[in-house]
Every structure is written in structure tokens, then in C-alpha cells.
Image (spheres, rainbow, N blue to C red):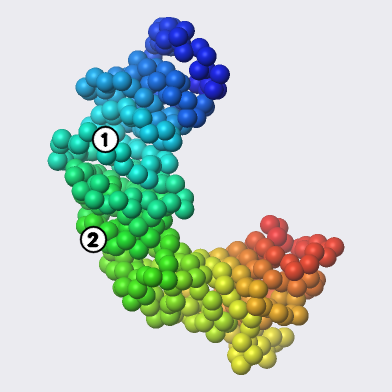
Amino acid sequence: LRADRNINRYQASMQPYVKTIGELLPRVSKLVLQGATQCEVLDEWFGDLALHYSNQLRYLDRDYCIVIDTPPLQTFNMLTNLNVTFGEFANYSTACAAASQLQHLRIYNIPCSVDESLPAVKTTTIVFPELRYLLLEYPRASNVFANIKAHASLPKLKLPCLETLHILFGGNYCPVLACAVLPTSMKSINIIGQYGILSVLDKCGVQRVEKLMMTALLNPTNNASDTKNLIKSLYDCNRVTRYGCLRLDKTLTLKPEDLETLTITHLQIGMEMDSAMVIAFITKLSRLVDIKFTNVSMEDPVLNLADPEINGDIGKTVVPFAAPINSLSVNYNNNRDSTQPVPELITYLLLRLPMLRYLTANKVSAEDITKHVEQFEPHFPHLSHISFDLEECPPFIVKGRKGV
């Protein structure tokens, strides 16, 4: 159902429609409510409509939270999927969703402050016995839950069957994660947050996870040594069993040795580095499948990247890297100043990554790059997608390969 703000003028005549819709559509099990954001009248009407179907709904999706005055006990006791996006006005209450059947829970735009007038939670433990998937998304660029003391009385959240956890833009503290009792083994964890929330994750009791994705939003005040130790603990090969994705901004300086023994298959790193450091990361991290360098400086004139056998039998003279990399992205910073049509570093890496399928690079000068691709095409048997961000845009066409 969709509605707009004009619904305010029909407040008095809206209630009969709940009964009418219920009579016309008596067997609804999936309800999606959209539109009229920050409209308290509509939120109350949507709340009445949801409450009408509460004991038969299995799926409820609402753009903004629904308001239900004094909801009865055992409301929504059949619900297995719940998606809610919070509004901005403070006086809301959310539908009481019975925890016993809930399997998928997604909550977006979670408020960044706590209303101290809200009644205290009386129970000490809440159990979600069937919950498999939990997504919590906080507003971007906000100081989420700066007042940690306000959450000291929150109950423990037991999630014995949780398989997938997403916490997005959780700032430096996430009260749900701090209160959660997670299973020792999980399928997937995805965290975007600052050091504090990542530290809580490290201590939450998960001993094994198949897939760990982490974006560390760090700042210069973070202790570099503590951050490195935290990354080593989270991505330990005994904890992450299959897939490890780590995204770091430019504030953290790392050496390849810091990540060498970890389960990191996908890496995006923002610290400034020269060609020698790029090569060192690829050489040391043998599990890499996808790597993105977002802050590469101009080629080091001391490092000779040229291959003297470039026109000879390359297959016999160039030793490939051990990492099975199939996706490479090299983004140069503004310090790069080269007249080469394709930087030597890219050529150097291409000849040593035989499994490469996807190549992305920027700051490439406006030369005819088709010659470069065609010259070494026999040595790139899997390369299917190339994306170059040119410094200029000449009238040429890259041809000869599907998907380029």
C-alpha cells in the first residue's frame, strides 16, 4: 500500500478502511507499507492495518515504523520476516513482534539517541530461537550511541541459530552487538564501523565464521598497534575458514607481513604506497583473489619494472605470482605524472597474474591502449573486462575482446 501526506486531512474518515480492506483481503500473509514518511497519522493507520492481520502475517515490510497504541500480547506471533525503517519523530512505538518465529530481521535508520523517558526493559534476557538473519543499519556519518551509559540496562539478546549478521555504519559502539550472545559458529558477518565496535566483535564468542567482511572506519587517534592486533585476531586462519574481505582507509599504515598469515581473500587498502609496496602485498598474500589499491603514487624511479624479455618467450622467463588473483584495481593518486600509455606497474603485474579476469586502473594517459592489450593478449587467457579511467578522452575503440 502506498500513501502520501494528503492523508492527514482524512484522519477522521480513515478508520473504516481498515475493516474494509480486511474484509476484501482476509488471507493476507505478506504486508508491505510504503510512503508518507514522517506522517504520524499514516503511521497510526498503518499500525491499525498491520494489527488487523497481526496473527496471520509472516512477512511485514514498512518504510517507517508503525505506531500501535497498547498492542496486545502475543501480537505478530506468526511473523518470520520483518523489515522496518525508523522515522525521525521521537514519539514512536514499534509493533511488538513475537520473537519465537522470527527468522529474518532487518532494521534501518536506527535512532542515534535514546529517549530516557521510555520505560525500562523489565526482562533480563530476550531469546530469538529461530533468527537466522539480522541486519542493523545506522545513519551514516553520525556519532552513534555516544551515550553508552543509557544502554547499561539492556537485556541480553540470545541468538542461538544466527547465521548471518550485518552491522552497517555502527560507529564506535553498537548496543545490540554488545548485548548479543552469538553462536560459536556462523556463516557470514559483515561489519562497517570504528575500532570500538570491531573490538566488541572480536570478543563476542564467535570462534569460526565462513565469511568475514569488515570495513574499518579508523581515525588517526586509533592506536596502530592495537588495530593491527585486532585485525590479526579477527582474520586468524583458525577463525575465518573460507572468505575474508578487509577494507582499510588511508589512516592505517600496514606492512605485507602484518597480513601474511591471515585468511584475507579480498583486500582494499587506502594507504599511500609506491610500486614496490604494491608488488610486496601481492607477493606476500598468497590467498588473495581480489585486491584494490586506492592510493598508489607514481612509479619509483629506483625500481626497474621493465621486462628485458618483453618481446621474447614470456611464458618461460616470467614467474607468475602464487596468489590466484582474478580482479585487480590500481588507482593512482594526484601525485602521478607519467607519459606512459599504460603504467609499467600494470604491465608488470599483468604478466604475472595469469588468472586475472578484471582489470581497473585510473590516471592512464590518452594513448591508443589497444596496442598494449593486443601485444600481450596471448598471456592473458582469462582477461575479459578492462576499465581504464583516461586522463583525456580520445576517439578510439578498444576492440577484439568481448566484454572490454
- In this rendering, the count of numbered labels is 2
Q: Residue at x 67, y 64 (%)?
A: 386
Q: Nearer the viewer, residue 339 or 349?
A: 339
Residue 348 falls in image quadrant = bottom right
Is 227 displayed left or right of 255 in the figure?
left
Q: Which residue is the site of mark 1?
A: 117
- Can you tell which of label 2 and label 1 is closer to the viewer? 1
The foreground one among 400 and 81 is 81
Residue 24: assigned label: none
Could one spot residue 168 in this view of the protein? yes
**Along the polypeptide, which appears first: circle 2 or circle 1?**
1
In the orientation shown, which residue stands out farthest toward the front? 117
Q: Position of residue 191 (x, y in %)?
A: 38, 55
What residue is drawn where x is 31% and y is 65%? 234
On the image, the x and y values in percent for residue 50 come to 37, 20
172 is higher (above) or lower (below) than 276: above
Disc 1 crowd rating (10 Å Cα; few below 14, some 14-19, many 20+) is few
Q: Secondary structure at mark 2?
A: loop
Measured along the vertical axis of the image, is residue 73 above or below residue 334?
Answer: above
Callout 1 secondary element: loop
Q: Which residue is mark 2?
A: 203
Give residue 184's position: percent from left, percent from top.
22, 55
Q: Residue 84 lies in what quarter of the image?
A: top left
Residue at image location 52% in from the left, 82% down from the top: 277
Q: CA distance from mark 2 to mark 1?
A: 31 Å
Left or right: residue 167 versus residue 371 is left
State the quadrant of the C terminus.
bottom right
**Amino acid tagged 1:** Ser
Neighbour tally class for label 2: few under 14, some 14-19, many 20 plus, Cα within 10 Å: few
Residue type at mark 2? Lys
- Measuring 32% from the left and 58% from the top, which residue is drawn there? 197
